[in-house]
Image: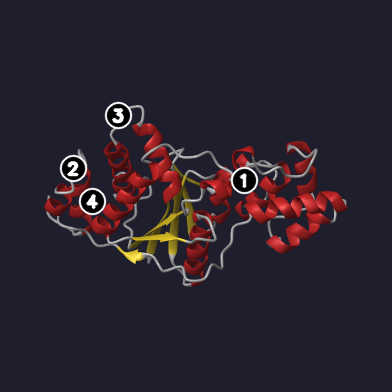
Amino acid sequence: MTDAIFDANSLFARSWYAAQRISTDPKEAVRLAINTILLLLNPDTNKIGSLFDRTLFAWDSHRDEDKDRAEKPPNYYETMDVLKEILAFMLNTVNVIHQNAEGDDIVSTVIHKGLREKHTSYVISGDKDLMQLQEENCQYYSLHDKALLSSAFIIHKFGNIKRPSQVALYLAIVGDPVDKIKGITGFGEVRCKKLFEAITPDMDLKTVIRVILNQLNERQREEFYYALERTLLKNDLVGIPDPSPLEFREPEEVYDLGIPQIGYYYREVHRIYLKEPF
């Protein structure tokens, strides 16, 4: 079983802001998002080389004010909801929202369940937080780099860590301005590297946290715990459905949706998955 788990907020945001450089028509953002998804599902173009059996799109709830984020532009959420409906119709996918957790935590919960069930999973995202899920049976596809990122690449990117699962610890120590995470006062890459010197690749996450805490004073521990609460993904959300088996509508039905310039990409994916002749 091979699953494509989409960090849908990241994908849509990239499509929305890219579309603004082309047109003010909200359909342009939908078109860009759908074409990106179809290219990622197509083994001839996705740089993964695999067909997928199931898909799931994880979304944040519409709560910018709760997350201390800037208000979204007009029509942003309305266009997002249009995309959700089209994806459910076109691919039989499942769109998942949790009112008390972010989309990242939905992705993490689905991935951990898939790993327990011995599935192969691909996380598709532009969010560095989700790199902590990378391991043997879970690969991270970067929307920014348009490529699968290896564990070695992720470890090098965060310089001091020994395994991708430690990305959350790194961000909790040095902070993350994008998500307004302060980190530990006075700690940058140099002091973070010092904390990781005693850590080895074979240590589990609990052991790594204990080693780090043993090097911090009481105030630093409080700051670390506070930041880690936001950087360490939840993997035990209740009520999260499984990914949905991929099913494709007939191309004519998709054309009738009126989204420009998606016909070729959809026809190609439809042909490949349904094993239609050239």
Residue at left offset 49%, top offset 69%:
113
Q: Residue 155, labelled with which disc?
A: 1
Q: Which residue carries the number 4 mark? A: 269
Q: Residues within 10 Å of mark 4 (few under 14, many from 20)?
A: many
Q: Residue 216: in sight, yes or no?
A: no
Does 268 sit left or right of 100 as displayed? left
Q: What element carries label 1?
A: helix
Does 18 sit left or right of 252 as displayed? right
Q: Earlier in the sequence, mark 2 or mark 4?
A: 2
Q: Is mark 4 on a helix, strand or loop?
A: helix
Mark 2 or mark 3, which is nearer to you? 3
Q: Residues within 10 Å of mark 2 (few under 14, many from 20)?
A: few
Residue at left offset 54%, top offset 67%:
237
Q: Earlier in the sequence, mark 1 or mark 3?
A: 3
Q: Nearer the viewer, residue 88 or 91?
A: 88
Q: Is mark 2 on a helix, strand or loop?
A: helix
Q: Where is residue 27 in the image (x, y as percent from the top left)?
A: 27, 39
In the rendered structure, which amino acid carries the disc numbered 4? Answer: Val
Q: Which of marks 1 and 4 is nearer the N terminus?
A: 1
Q: Where is residue 57 in the image (x, y as percent from the top left)?
A: 39, 56
In the rendered structure, which amino acid carries the disc numbered 3? Answer: Ser
Q: Residue 264, labelled with which disc?
A: 2
Q: Nearer the viewer, residue 239 or 108?
A: 239
Q: What element carries label 3?
A: loop
Q: Distance between the residues labelled 4 and 3?
A: 26 Å
Q: How crowded is mark 1: few (under 14 residues within 10 Å), some or many (20 or more)?
A: some
Q: Which residue carries the number 3 mark? A: 23
Q: How far apart are marks 2 and 3 (CA)?
A: 21 Å
Mark 1 or mark 4, which is nearer to you? 4
